[in-house]
Image: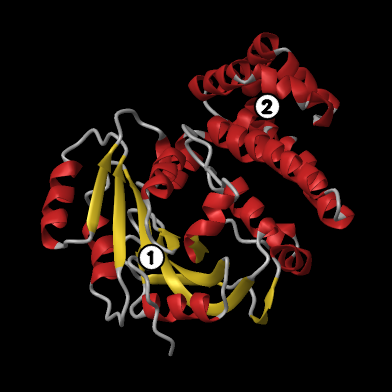
Amino acid sequence: MSKIINSIDISFIIPFYNGKKYIKECVESICNQIVECVNFEIIIINDCSTDDSIDTLKIIEKQYNNIVIINHNSNKKQGGARNTGIQNAKGKYIWFIDQDDYIKKDSINKLLNLAEDNRLEILQFCFDEVNEKGIFIRSHFFGNFPTIITGIDYIQDMGLNSHPYTIWSRLYKREFIVENNFLFPENRVIFEDYAFAIDSMLKAERVKIISDSEYCYRINDLSTMQKSYLNFKAIYSYHTCISCGIELIDISKKHTNNPKVSKQLLYGGIWRINQFTKGLLKSEIIETNNFFELIQQNINQIEYYKSYFNPVNRFIVEHPIISRLLVIFIKPILKLIGILKCKK
């Protein structure tokens, strides 16, 4: 096993918001590992927590001498917190961690040595889903490539739909992120890592995929994704469909020298951008209003991409005020039809 020599070998970046329930377990999963010749820092970005979570952070900070706490002056969501982490990271590699998740035992040495020995820009590994109590649910497998490949080859081999968008199941070389100016969109509630995950993979020239599971992703009702899906179907649809669709279309334009990949990205973006109607029709009135407020706030950007919407969806985004009234009016009718169909 090669020895990694660097002032700071790895920076763990953890966005934090009202996360006192799981943050201690998250940090301890990092600090309690047996590491050899490895120096690491844990950067926790407190994104304007509204409860007493900062007290929990201060207690943890006193226990370990390699924790850096950065307090935001305004709430920038997970994407903004990760950007702050990148700007302040000193490690040769970066590992993004979510506040309610944790890493597996003895993973740090293994992954760092793999990254160093193979001069990797991205090391992709697998992860497990666990429940609130940390009990195993299922594993997510992303393939096993024994040789070093490019990110484009990986996506061509796996297909865009099979490509993992989980930035926390990767080890990134910090220099690679900084030199390519990879940043997350700020102030977005969900799917802020979607474009980052795809764009960075497509740019990488040295990627290794391993079948080992090194990360535990916790499924719980307090997570941003769960709350967004259960309670904010319209906003969830806006970002997972329109925002992510636009991002895919933009990324496709960067890869015109590879027509197959560019076409795959473009068609994927067009498909995604037109999938928002289902979530919109399922949402409550307050969320319907929130959805159309997002449309109006981003109308200049949407106007640029309106040719990619199908005729019905184009009408919706071009006429948000009229469409809002139509959607609010038509939803009770659709529900009634649904009830009548159930009776049959």
Where is residue 185 drawn, in percent x and y?
53, 37
Number of numbered discs present?
A: 2
Amino acid type, residue under disc 2 in the picture: Leu
Say if 216 sits above or below 105 in the image.
Answer: above
In what element is the residue under mark 1?
Answer: strand
Q: Would you say 113 lies left or right of 262 here? A: left
At x 38%, y 53%, the residue is: 89
Disc 2 secondary structure class: helix
Residue 344 visible in this rendered orientation of the protein: no
What residue type is disc 1 on?
A: Ile
Query: Is any atom of residue 155 visible in this view?
Result: yes
Q: Earlier in the sequence, mark 2 or mark 1?
A: 1
Question: Is 100 left or right of 330, judged from the image as shown?
Answer: left
Residue count near mark 2 (Cα–Cα under 10 Å), binned few <14, some 14–19, many ≥20: few
Crowding at mark 1 (Cα within 10 Å: few <14, some 14-19, many 20+): many
Res. 334 mark: 2
Residue 333 position, x and y percent, is: 67, 21
Residue at x 57% of width, y 51% of height: 179
Q: Nearer the viewer, residue 109 or 116?
A: 116
